Image (cartoon, grey):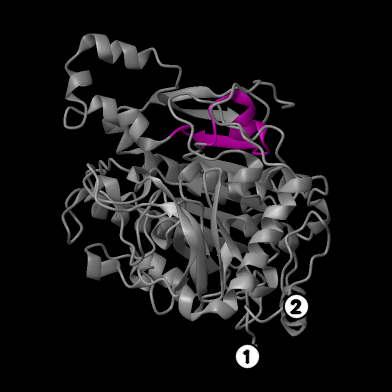
Amino acid sequence: MTSFDPIASQTVRTAETREPGFVHAAQRAAAAQRLAKRKRPPNILVFLMDDVGWGDFGCYGGGVAVGAPTPHFDRLAAGGLRLTSCYSEPSCSPSRATLMTGRVPNRHGLHRPPMYGEPGGLQGEVTLPQLLGEAGYTTQAVGKWHIGENEASQPQHVGFDDFYGFLSVSDMYSEWRDPQFFPEIVYSAARTEWIKNMPFNRCFVHAKKGGAASNVEEVTIPVLSQLDEKWCRYSEDFIQRQAGTGKPWLLYHCTRGAHFDNYPAEKYLGKSPAKHPYKDTLLELDEIMGRLVASLAKSGQLEDTLIFVSSDNGPHMETWPDSAFTPFRCAKGSTWEGGVRVPGLMSWPGTIEAGQSSDGLFDFNDLLPTALALAGASEKLPQDRYIDGIDQSDFLVAPGGLSNRKYHYYWLGTTFSGLRCGEYKMLISAASDAPTDAAGPGGFTGVLERFAYPRLYNLYLDPKEQHNYLTRKLAYVEAFQLGMRTHLGTFRKFPPKRVMGLKVKDERAG
């Protein structure tokens, strides 16, 4: 397996609606042998954080070294598979929709986050919880949603049996309440009233499948500081309840932290070595991870559960120092590595071998076909639309597994930015990351640059993407351009979709 080369090897396309992937026959056989010992499909716990950087955990070189120890995340990494090339999209809503649908943003249509009551666009999409529900799974969403507040895009209408969390994003509930950031609103009754009349829900909510969301509590700053604790308890209760049902389940647990602005719970305030709100919040997220794992162990479900831990994008450097750590170039909002390469931990005790690390490519859109394969429900993948995700089940389960993905495609909104294969990355456009009027450069403050000639970076030698290697590596040009042409060519038969900035009919049928 170690002699395999992703650049020189060919992929197989099984259908015109499927992303081509590698076929590792021996690996598939080894994975099948391991999975045959399982008596039932696995539970699936997706633990998705907000704006946490690739390098924040100790197992990625951060932890104590950057002022916030992460023993529970590190323990998960030691007991499973640590992915070093796990890819999200450049911002949270595109990432979350990609994870839910197995499709890149230019297909599902959420190219950017909806804000202050804007509708999303999951109506008309086929989702992970919907398909797992059809396969007999109980499906639970907890925490941040942010794929649209319109009713048709809410979790209880796109496949989840239950939802307990908020529909938007952390700063939307807090920024206009904090005089440090918005004194001109806080100290103005007229502007405060103007904000309150905006069409977004200022509460976190609870909803059952097919029903309307009911308000639980208004998200003031004191409430915001308690949300991750409240959501953790809800997920712990769910795990305990499911133990006696005999049914497999999906728990999609999305944290409030560590999106700016962070207001740590009193228990964690000033407790990190860094004595900073962002780092204090990382301590809480790490402890919550530990509590969920403990609930699985206590209820006898740990060895029946696949755990996937990640972040919805890279750090939001414009809010420095209330932002995360990455060793790569730029940050959230960009297609430089710092914007989209995120932590990725996979744990399934007794099935995924402990102590593994892999730089094989794993995309957020791979989760859907992988989960369906492990659930024994691959036939439920829709045939009427293009699925960008690849079944990576044998990559995860076979000892020393190789990724089945040849390319990662970088999309910046509606603009195709480039692709990666092996250690090389070719870019044709990207966001500039020169210093701006923000506190730190990167991501959302940049302007779109279309390069006159492609740029080629060796990510092993140059993780900061500072040295364009193209002139010395012309042998790669045709192979990479073929990958681009093939990917973009799929949009001729399966046209792109756009929903942001458009009025969306709020009908459950979409």
Which is nearer the eye, 452 or 231?
A: 452
Residue, disc 2: 28
Dot 1 alpha-carbon crowd within 10 angstroms: few under 14, some 14 to 19, many 20 or more: few
* Position of 122 relative to 214 (above/below): below
Q: Please give the name of the residue rendered at 39% of the width and 43% of the height, measured from the top-left corner.
A: 256
Q: Please name the residue shown 63% across and 66% down the image.
A: 481
- Secondary structure of the residue carrying tag 2 is helix
Residue drawn at x 57%, y 56% is 364
Indicate the secondary structure of the residue bearing disc 1. loop
Horizontal placement of 66 versus 107: left or right? left
Residue 389 in view: no
Q: Start and end of the magenta stretch?
A: 147-168
- How far from the left and from the top, in percent, is residue 244? 65, 52
Which residue is tagged 1? Answer: 3
- Closer to the chain start, of discs 1 and 2, is 1
Image position, residue 400 (x, y; %): 60, 83
Q: What amino acid is labelled 2 in the image?
A: Arg
Rendered image quadrant of residue 263: top left
* Spatial separation of the CA atoms under disc 1 and disc 2: 17 Å
In the image, residue 133 lies in the stretch drawn in magenta: no
Residue 109 visible in the shown view: yes
Quarter location, residue 194: top left
> Is residue 483 or residue 266 the one in the foreground?
483
